[in-house]
Amino acid sequence: MIGAAARFGATALIAGVVLAGPAHAACKPKAFGSGSGANAGIATNKAIQNWRANVLAAYGVAFTNWLKAQNRGRRCLKSGAVTTCRVWGNPCN
């Protein structure tokens, strides 16, 4: 026979799993953005703004938070006085 404490513990464990929800957020396929500027900081900010605009158009506002994106990446190249950056990541809500 299972004691009351064991039943309570099992019930609490099940409730915790149900209330906590999924272990990870829903994510969409990788999206890209690019931007240019006088330095990598400016170019990266513009690239992220472009990424957000692309994600908004494809998946809606719930997925536009860059900080929630998984598998984020960035690559910048400097050519003369201009730096161009490309960012990518899987948008998540």
Image: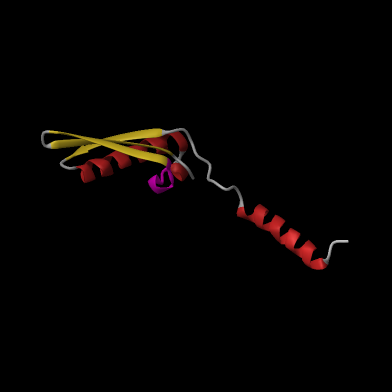
Q: Residue at x 32, y 35 (%)?
A: 33
Q: How many marks?
A: 0
User: Picture coordinates of residue 84 (x, y %)?
Assistant: 22, 35
Check the image and report above or below for 8 versus 52: below
User: Picture coordinates of residue 4 (x, y %)?
Assistant: 82, 67
Stretch in magenta: 64-70
Front-lying residue, 84 or 93:
84
Furthest toward the front, the residue is 1
User: Picture coordinates of residue 13 (x, y %)?
Assistant: 70, 58
Q: Answer with left or right where residue 54 lies relative to residue 26.
A: left
What kind of colouring is applied to the model shown? secondary structure
**Which quadrant of the figure has residue 86?**
top left
Q: Residue at x 67, y 53 (%)?
A: 18
Q: Residue at x 73, y 63 (%)?
A: 9
User: Picture coordinates of residue 32 (x, y %)?
Assistant: 36, 33
Q: Answer with left or right where residue 87 lies relative to residue 79.
A: right
